[in-house]
Image (tube, grey):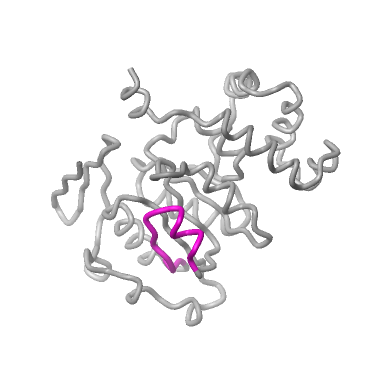
Amino acid sequence: MLRSSQSAGRTFAWLEDGCQHGWRADERHSILLDMDASTRPSQDILGNDTIQVAVVDDHALIRLGVQSAIDAEPGLACVAVMASGDELGSSDARPDVVVLDYHLPRVNGLELCRRTKLGELAPAVVLYSAYADPALVVPALVAGADAIVHKGAPARELLAAIHAVAGGGRRLPPLSPALLEAAGTMLDADDLPILGMLVAGTDRGEIAATMRLDTGEFEQRVDAMVARLRPVPRMARRGSD
């Protein structure tokens, strides 16, 4: 269920996640509901310093709002807007940053983040989610996410995260001892050294070498870790009660 309204130049949407999302559009950058791929700038004509961003979200109004905010920000350009992980996998776009919803049809954002980060020239990934609570921090880190931004946060937080990760930084919430301890109880004992090195920011190739695993074995271990650590969205938990 999606409802929207207009108030003081701001577009609001209430989505199935129960959160209110809003973006302000100025006179130059309005949210155009009929915007399609033909209206977006070609990667060939963007300057070398422009950070190219792809957006993956299954809610049309969220995609359009995020695209509008990105295109209004100096130094950023939205080069692809997609509704599913399948579209991301088949896209010809080569973004520097992917803004990725966590709760997608047929695939969760952590799994899609893992796929996206496996490439040799993998983009930075910002998980943009209404489920961005502390339970997401450890699995997001293990999956290779570079930032987490809550959908209820002001647009400037998302834009700041995009700039940060494009420059090689991270925007992940701090890890508390309680979160790490809880994560450790969900993993096999043999996986705890991998978790510790990932938390410390150790290069994944170095982790594989330290653990005497080839690349395929290491990636399988990490996939299994992400699956065990993946939090169940609140809506799904309520639906199972």
Magenta highlight on residue 85:
yes
* 66 left or right, relative to 6: right
Where is the C terminus found, in terms of image quarters? Answer: top left
Residue closer to the observer: 50 or 236: 236
Looking at the image, is 36 positioned above or below residue 161? below
Q: Which residues are magenta?
A: 76-91
Task: Name the image quarter holding residue 102.
Answer: top left
* 27 left or right, relative to 183: left
Identify the residue at the far bottom of this view: 45
Expressed as whole percent of the image width and height from the top left, the position of residue 99 reads 46, 53
Q: Residue at x 61, y 21 (%)?
A: 186
Expressed as whole percent of the image width and height from the top left, the position of residue 187 reads 65, 24
Q: Residue at x 52, y 78 (%)?
A: 47
* 82 left or right, relative to 201: left
Where is the N terminus found, in terms of image quarters? Answer: top left
Looking at the image, is 113 positioned above or below residue 183? below
Counting every numbered tag in the picture gives: 0
* 68 left or right, relative to 26: right
Residue closer to the observer: 233 or 150: 233
Q: Residue at x 52, y 31 (%)?
A: 230
Looking at the image, is 150 positioned above or below residue 81? above
Magenta highlight on residue 219:
no
Expressed as whole percent of the image width and height from the top left, the position of residue 110 reads 52, 41
Residue closer to the observer: 54 or 238: 238
Expressed as whole percent of the image width and height from the top left, the position of residue 30 reads 24, 65
Residue closer to the observer: 32 or 185: 185
Q: Residue at x 57, y 23 (%)?
A: 179
